[in-house]
Amino acid sequence: MPLGARDPVTYHRDFVDAYRPNESYLLPQRLADELYQAGRLAGQQPAGTYARKVFEQLLIDLSWSSSRLEGNRYTLLATKELFERGVDGDDTDAVMLLNHKRAIEYLVEGVPTEGLTTAVLRNLHATLMEALLANDNALGTIRGTVVNISDTVYVPAQVAAVLHEMLQAIVDKARLIKNPVEGAFFLWVNVAYLQPFEDGNKRTSRLAANIPLMLYNCAPLAFLDVDPSDYAQAMLGIYELQNAAAAVDLFAWTYRRSIKKYAVVKSSFASPDPRRLRYRPALEEAVRMIVLERQSAAAAVEGVAHTEDKAPGFAALLAETLQSLGEYNCARFRLTSTATREWVEAGRPM
């Protein structure tokens, strides 16, 4: 319906109050379970592992997508260049993007230790909105203006208290939700619906939705390729009707996009060989013994006390390393190019 034909509405706190974690569901339960299984990182890993694996790409994707939904005019390529320069200037669009970058860095660094709290959400807002609000005192501050909530008019002190109470309720319930995808959706729609801050509520809600996903090592939610008009429709369904149907469709579509993209990004960065991490000091010493002292590989293995019974796989790793050793990669073993070239020209004696 046209805006002029729609009835004004108030905030209905029942949308949160009636919600019972793990009994109520905003996402269809089967859909939430499906997305969780598709998006989670296999195995037991410390919180935030998935986000750190795709960190560089996430910084660009989420910063650009979220800012674009706010009308930011930067292209994706221009965003990459901005992040490489790191220059703020007085361009509001640049400030918005750089604030997103810093806020995502804050989440990836802080969420694994701090978890989900109102303090985290308020710091998230302050980071996102720095230099974008007329009053710095509004950064991370619960707004206090006269509003109408469920047909009751609150004066400033009352509204600030009610908004703080509702934000705390949202956080408390989100912490209890066992399925992190449902938790992400719950935070996304409810922080935006409550509008606890003077401005920047939707961008805060988009980044906040990633907190449960980070804690449970699920693919992050970057709102890839979301059309601004579709996003507005999804939010209006919540604001005006407390109907999550359009938001569910949008969320499921864009989260599937995120799952597929970050699975590819994650797989493109192969995990380092754990043997190289474990045997690194001994490997360096053995290589130097072979190249500089012309000892045999067997003697070097004995010399560093890494025989097969004590260090399984070390001898094979040493042989593999020596086969690829050359002037272009010898510095990691504190070898000079000249010494390495002479050893190679001698036929790689080992």
Image: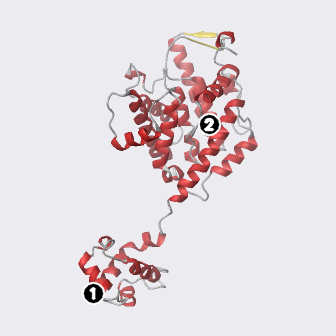
Q: Is residue 209 left or right of residue 346?
A: right
Give the amino acid type for the residue marked by disc 1 in the picture. Answer: Glu
Q: Residues within 10 Å of mark 2 (few under 14, many from 20)?
A: many
Query: Is residue 308 shown above or below 11?
Result: below
Residue in the picture at 45% in, 27% down: 140
Query: Is residue 282 shown above or below 243?
Result: below
- Labels 1 and 2 touching (C-beta < 8 A): no
Q: What quarter of the picture does the C terminus occupy?
A: bottom left
Q: Is residue 176 visible?
A: no
Residue in the picture at 43% in, 82% down: 319
Give the amino acid type for the residue marked by disc 2 in the picture. Answer: Ala
Q: Secondary structure at mark 1?
A: helix
What residue is disc 1 on?
293
**Residue 194 screen position, x and y as percent:** 59, 23
Query: Is residue 337 shown above or below 71?
Result: below
Picture quadrant of residue 97:
top left
- Mark 1 or mark 2, earlier in chain: 2
Q: What quarter of the picture does the N terminus occupy?
A: top right
What residue is disc 2 on?
174
How is the rendered protein coloured?
secondary structure
Q: Is residue 43 visible?
A: yes
Q: Is residue 207 left or right of residue 177?
A: left
Q: Secondary structure at mark 2?
A: helix
Q: Nearer the viewer, residue 319 or 51?
A: 319
Nearer to us of marks 1 and 2 is 1
**Residue 246 screen position, x and y as percent:** 69, 30
